[in-house]
Amino acid sequence: MNSEYYLVPPHRILSEKEAEKVLAELKIPASRLPKIFVTDPQAKKLGAKVGQIIEIDRGEDGKYYRLVVPAQ
């Protein structure tokens, strides 16, 4: 889902199967991923739930992954 704001790269929630594949490729558990709060504007816009993984596509810089965590 793209943001209307041009500086925000596209974000999307990975399916469980996609998340398993990414974690296997990275050879890490989900808990080692950088975090994104469930209250983050992009997480809220996507309707993300705690425990899901969000993919951020930064074009030439590659894809980045964030684990959705509860707000603090």
Image (tube, rainbow, N blue to C red):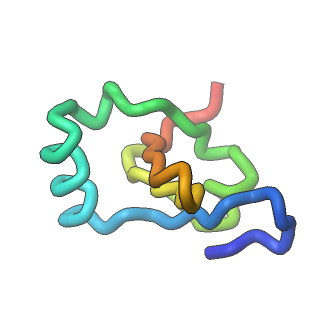
Q: Is residue 42 above or below residue 3?
A: above
> Residue drawn at (70%, 45%), measured in percent from left and top?
40
Residue 27 vertical position relative to residue 4 in the rendered view, above or below: above
Numbered label tally: 0
Is 2 left, or right, of 54 in this rendering? right
Comparing 35 with 6, the one in front is 6
Residue visible at 17% across and 56% down in the picture: 21
* Residue projecting furthest to the right: 5
Identify which residue, 40 or 20, lies in the foreground: 20
Residue 28 in the image, given as x and y percentages of width and height: 20, 31
Q: Nearer the viewer, residue 11 or 49?
A: 11
Pick out the residue farthest to the front. Answer: 60
Q: Does residue 7 lie above or below 72 as drawn?
A: below
Q: Is residue 43 left or right of residue 30?
A: right
**The N terminus sits in image quarter:** bottom right
Instruction: Answer with left or right where residue 60 lies relative to residue 65.
Output: right
Question: Residue 30: horizontal and vertical position, in percent?
Answer: 29, 36
x 81%, y 58%: residue? 7
Which quarter of the figure has residue 37? top right
With respect to residue 47, does 31 lie above or below?
A: above
In this view of the protein, which residue sits in the foreground, 5 or 17? Answer: 5
Residue located 57% across and 38% down the image: 36
Quarter of the picture containing the C terminus is: top right
Instruction: Say left or right for 40 vs 34.
Output: right
Query: For residue 43, what is the image quadrant?
Result: bottom right
